[in-house]
Amino acid sequence: MKRITVVIFLALCSVSLKGTAQLGFCQGSSGSPIFTEDFGTGITNGPALPPGTTTYTYVNGPPDDGSYTITSNTAGYFDWFNIQDHTPDDVSGKAFIVNASFTAGEFYRRSIDGLCENTSYEFSSWLLNLHPRMGVGCPNNGIPVNVQFQIWDSTDTNLLASGDTGDIEDKTTPEWEQYALLFTTLPGQSSVILKMINNGSGGCGNDLAIDDIAFRSCGDLVTLSDTQNRNSIFQCEVDSPVGSLTLSATPDFSIFNNHFYQWQESTDNSSWVNIPGETTDTYSTPILTDSRYYRVVVSEDLININNNLCNVISQVFEIVFVPTPNPPSSIGDIRICENIENGLLTVRVPPGVQVDWYDAPTGGTLLDTDTITYSTDIAGTYYAEAVSTLAYCPSSNRTAVTLEFYPLPEVNDEVISFCENEDVLLQAGVSASRYEWSTGETTSEITVSQPGIYTVEVTDSNGCSNIKTIEVLQINLPVIEEIRTVDNNIVVNTSNVGEAEYSLDGLNFQNESVFQKIPGGLYTISVRGDSSCSNVTREFFHLVVPKFFTPNGDGINDFFEVEGIGSLSDYEINLYDRYGKLIKNALGEPLRWDGSFNSRLLPSGDYWFTVRIENNIYQGHVALVR
């Protein structure tokens, strides 16, 4: 960070002091530098200053108290800041690094000869406190830097002017600050000696860097303007020429009492030549077709008008012909996927040229200004125009840039049902170059066995992606909770809620869960909840026994028997009288009882039976009626 510090200071050294001085900057126009010192460039330290320039001792490395070095960086120097020099655009630029002595004293001097009498001058330098605030080297901050600028006569015996910087305290970051001393020479004074003196006390701190010491004349602030009160003109080349202008030089009379002029011109604002005969405060330019720069040299005495140690230079009046810029260079048309919010169109132009965007190759609506990019969500062709920033000089043509949106892969969300305990095939349903399922699979179709929400991101050859969502619903199979015989009916109970169909043969289904008047026997009961899903089946023996039988020989209900049990392989039937006496037994074969025991007819009454089918036992009673 660079900061300009201005302190006003008036010093009268004695009643015999001939010059006047103040610590501050020239507020008017300055002359060309009479003397500058930037201490050179390079990555090695040194060289030492010429003999007589300083009373300090040169060292090739970190300087101790009373020593100095010339270096491009201070890395590893105690706990100091590692700095770069101040000179603009320097590569490996060097600075004057001073570790102040324990006693106040001079650390820099320079003689200046050939000065003009009765002329104001500015002596300046950039200073930096090298010690960081709260640095480890100096607890509670270091001793501040304090420098005095002095002007002595050529005999080095009379102090003509001086001014102090005051304390330059530690900073948290390195900070170059400029200080300057103004003074005016008296009649007969043509040489001076410039000095910088260490005012600070010795000890921890008071370490400084110095760069860009300069000495130049100082005079009135001189401004240039034309009859329209313009200070410069920037005009497009296509609008040339510029007619003759009358330029006027206006001093502010802050320093000079008299003014003598010499007008100068330049084609590059760098090399200047005098315009013969133009020595008044006005100048009329010729008709111009190319860029020109004008300034005026001003002095207080005519004899000094060509003496750069004594004159000053006005502001520059610029007449610049701005070339028509080339149309912007496009980086190419843009094609993006339609789900990207905006397309960014981009062009390139050289420095000093801005870009305006339009919706037509000529005329049209201005869409955006001063930007090399244009963002839009509307497909179409847009036009970039180059415009000079010095003057409104547009390019002769506009550059067309097209935005196109690729369509996304077309997908259709789905809801798919599948049967419990089965798999279901999910398909992306679109041809693409890449697939990415929420399961991590990367094929065009996958097989799943669980309900839920599945997604697949499909990406086409243009890199455009879309997401298909598939909701997979499971059709739960019926759960047979119980099958029972009620009289000669079969009753099926299921535990899950919902519509179901029932069958005794797996072919013919009914909505009712009760099968009525079914002959006894072994049945395979089938239940289905959806015709597309498999059936739930269970074998069931429908045990049908008569409630009574009449063995009277009429051919109707003459026997007690269990219907259909012969189809089983593991069963047993036992008959008992009311006292528990076994009357008849059949193991693995049908039982047919005519109501007799040992060829004797048993009386009417209730008789008990048990039927064992595998591990299940059923019991009941039957009435014998005679």
Image (tube, rainbow, N blue to C red):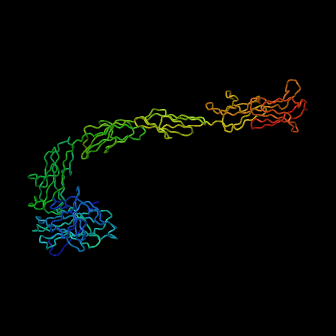
**Residue 173 x, y percent position in the rendering:** 31, 62
Task: Say which of 145 and 6 sits in front.
Answer: 145
Residue at image location 15% in from the left, 61% down from the top: 34
Q: Quadrant of the C terminus?
A: top right
Residue 317 appears anywhere in the view:
yes
**Residue 423 x, y percent position in the rendering:** 57, 35
Above or below, comparing residue 393 to residue 174 in the picture = above
Q: Quadrant of residue 540?
A: top right
Residue at image location 18% in from the left, 42% down from the top: 240
Task: Say which of 542 and 32 sits in front.
Answer: 542
Count of marks, rendered view: 0
**Residue 113 x, y percent position in the rendering:** 11, 65
State the residue lying farthest toward the top. Answer: 554
Q: Quadrant of residue 100?
A: bottom left
**Residue 77 x, y percent position in the rendering:** 28, 65
Horizontal side, residue 197 vs residue 622: left or right: left
State the residue lying farthest toward the bottom. Answer: 15
Above or below, comparing residue 324 to residue 183 in the picture = above
Residue 517 appears anywhere in the view:
no
Q: Quadrant of the N terminus?
A: bottom left
Q: Quadrant of residue 237?
A: top left
Horizontal side, residue 465 vs residue 152: left or right: right
Residue at image location 24% in from the left, 40% down from the top: 326
